[in-house]
Amino acid sequence: MANIQDVADAAGVSTASVSRFLAGQKVRTADAIRAAIKALDYTPSTIARSLKTGRHNAIGVVVPDITNPFFAGLVRGIEDQARVKGYDVILGNSDESPTQEEALVQALIKRVDGLIVAPIIEEDQSILSLSKTSVPVVLVDRSVTSTNYDSVLVDNIGGITLAVDHLVALGHTQIAFISGPFTSTPGRARHTGYVIASAARNLDHHPEFVIEGDFREESGDAAMRQLWNLPNRPTAVVVANNLMTIGALKALRELDVAVPAQMSIVGFDDLSFAELLQPPLTVIARGDNDQGSRAATLLFGRIQGTRTRSGEVMTLPVQLIVRKSTAAPLATTSGTPISSATTPKETTAL
């Protein structure tokens, strides 16, 4: 494998000239060096190049759960922008663990020109510690208190309001909520949306109708079973993310509960296979690729120095996509089901 000395010998120049050329500086012998690199099929070491330029030409991305389809789409949006800029993406999966997140962040800041992080909790020490470094940071999907970083969020409160309004319009008054962790931005904000929307529609307050999950499938399953076993069970449920929605649907299937006849369900985040589910799933949808793309655009603006003002919080819109998992609640006489209505597919934007 050719090295920098081989290139210098082939071009008839010094290794210093080759180094300056590789660092992007103008040298009189550029044509000869370029020809030697091509002839020798020389690939410069990224480590050596970063030592010369002070740039790594890479960004780091840390997400809580790469198996979540939302985060997979988010990373795809980031990668698309990075590719255009000629940057590599180094991905880390924190597995919803603050300890793992801190280890990833500390390892990445030595290898990248900037970081995009979906922090696990709002009081996130690994993110707060980054304020002592010069590494540009953009937060995505979730924010951290007491920081001034750019953030790309979605209208969590508005999204849950759309879901509750849709169910109320169908005639539901007993609406439960499977929340994410209250320590995270989407968990707290979506719960706030449920509380505000329920109060605005004069729905009865049932503390047992709110169950805090952890954004994973298993917690959605457990929460749905808990709701179904209540003496005064709900007729509809809003679930705060896609994986918990899958868990809730699994529980309902195993409990032999008919959706939407016995339980209407609305999930937060669309799934590529949502229309293939039986019944097709009503969701609050957002653009995961778009959220990632916008986060990357903000980060590259910081890296390149074109963005210098204090942190911007970008809140993206959501929309309600009505499919077949929601319907009017069963009318009852002496506890005997009488009828159930169905709803056509429709889309409501916020």
Image (spheres, grey):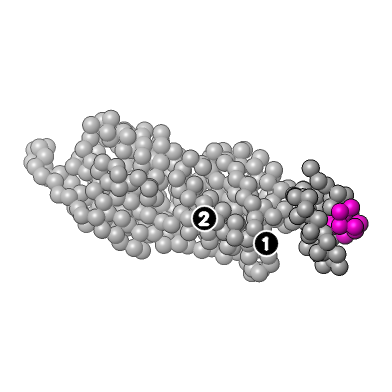
Q: Residues within 10 Å of mark 1 (few under 14, many from 20)?
A: some
Q: At which x and y percent is residue 184?
A: 50, 47
Query: Would you say residue 278 is visible in this rendering?
Result: yes
Closer to viewer: mark 1 or mark 2: 2
Which stretch appears magenta? 8-19
Mark 1 highlights which residue?
303
Q: Residue at coordinates 53% horizontally, 40% vertically from top-left?
A: 96
Q: Amino acid at mark 1?
A: Ile
Look at the image and tell me in which quarter the N terminus lies: top right
Mark 2 highlights which residue?
77
Q: Is residue 259 left or right of residue 37?
A: left
Q: Is residue 307 left or right of residue 326?
A: right
In the image, 336 versus 53, the foreground residue is 53
Q: Residues within 10 Å of mark 2 (few under 14, many from 20)?
A: many
Q: Amino acid at mark 2?
A: Gly
Q: From this viewpoint, which residue is outermost toward the top?
A: 254
Look at the image and tell me in which quarter the C terminus lies: bottom left
Q: Secondary structure at mark 2?
A: helix
